[in-house]
Image (tube, helix red, strand yellow):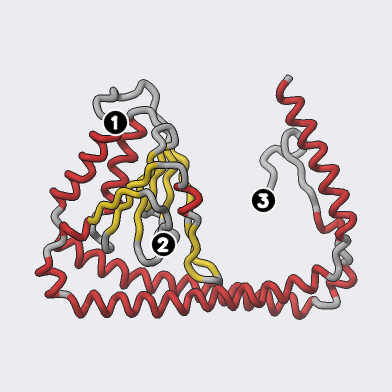
Amino acid sequence: MDPKNPGAVDEIIHLGDFWNEEGIRKHKREIMDDNREVGRNFRRAYRYIKGAYSFYEDSMEIISWGIDNAKVNSVAKEFIDLLFGDTDTAKKEGSIRRLFASAITPNGYVNYLSTLLEGNKVYMLEGRPGTGTEKVISKVMETAVEKGYDVEAYYCALNPLKLEHLVIPKLGVALATSNEYHKINIKDIVPINLDEYIDNKILDKYKCELEYNKEQFDSIMDSAIKSIAKAKEIHDRMETYYISNMDFEAIKICFEVTLTRILQYAEESKL
């Protein structure tokens, strides 16, 4: 990350001052080869994820043909009435902090939802792709911001544009999406199952397509995760060439000096 205002506000800490360049250069070929392979594996993983999402999208579209949108809209309205009642539109809108609570990692799907949602009253939206969980949460978020509440919006690791979870800190309330890819282990929740609003005729008619899509999605995502794991394995090996050639005692001193300066700046800002 390059400093925006070097010297005036920001400064660069160059850890390259603490390595043995001669020792690292002995592994030049290995480092270059490993770096290339890391990039190849990540690019392969991204292509797999993109391909897998196509099957996920197809299932979303199929489900959308059978979902009762009027009832989904009613669920959103009930939430809005419950949380905000007759609260007037604020003179100043609330802010939206956009974050991720989950990730696709070398170890598979990982999330920290239980920690993030702890201490809030949690309304758990359950439903297959295309049932409208995102629509409900988006409507609540828009209203919260209009009413002047700051919110935390958490997006999908597979599709960064898809809203999955919402926390309204001032109200101590959270709306979250739960599915097999990110389970939420919280005892005190209020479940809302949007699958109840799907026309079963659609599910029956496209049963084979939905099952096929899920099988393909899971299989391709498994390949993507294996590619990410392979990239990490190679990257870890590459790090060994650097670890053996770093002066960690000097880095520790640099850390202590930097921390002292940060604390001094913090004190100065109070004046």
Mark 1 or 3: in front is: 1
Seen at 30% across and 40% down, the residue is 140
- What's the residue at 80%, 69% (across, down)? 242
Q: Which residue is mark 2?
A: 182
Q: Residue at x 48, y 58 (%)?
A: 102
Give the image location of residue 16, x and y in percent.
82, 58
Name the residue: 84% across, 73% down. 25
Mark 2 residue type: His
Q: Type of residue at label 3?
A: Met
Labels 2 & 3 near each other (Cβ < 8 A): no
Which residue in the structure is indicated by mark 3? 1
Q: Residues within 10 Å of mark 2 (few under 14, many from 20)?
A: some
Amino acid type assigned to the residue bearing label 1 in the image: Phe
| Residue that protrudes farthest toward the front in the picture | 187
Q: How far across and how far down the image is residue 211, in percent?
A: 25, 78
Label 1 to label 3: alpha-carbon separation: 41 Å
Question: Within 10 Å of the Cα at label 1, are there few (<14), some (14-19), or many (20+) other Cα atoms?
Answer: some
Mark 3 residue crowding within 10 angstroms, few (<14) / some (14–19) / many (20+):
few
Can you tell which quarter of the image residue 228 is in?
bottom right
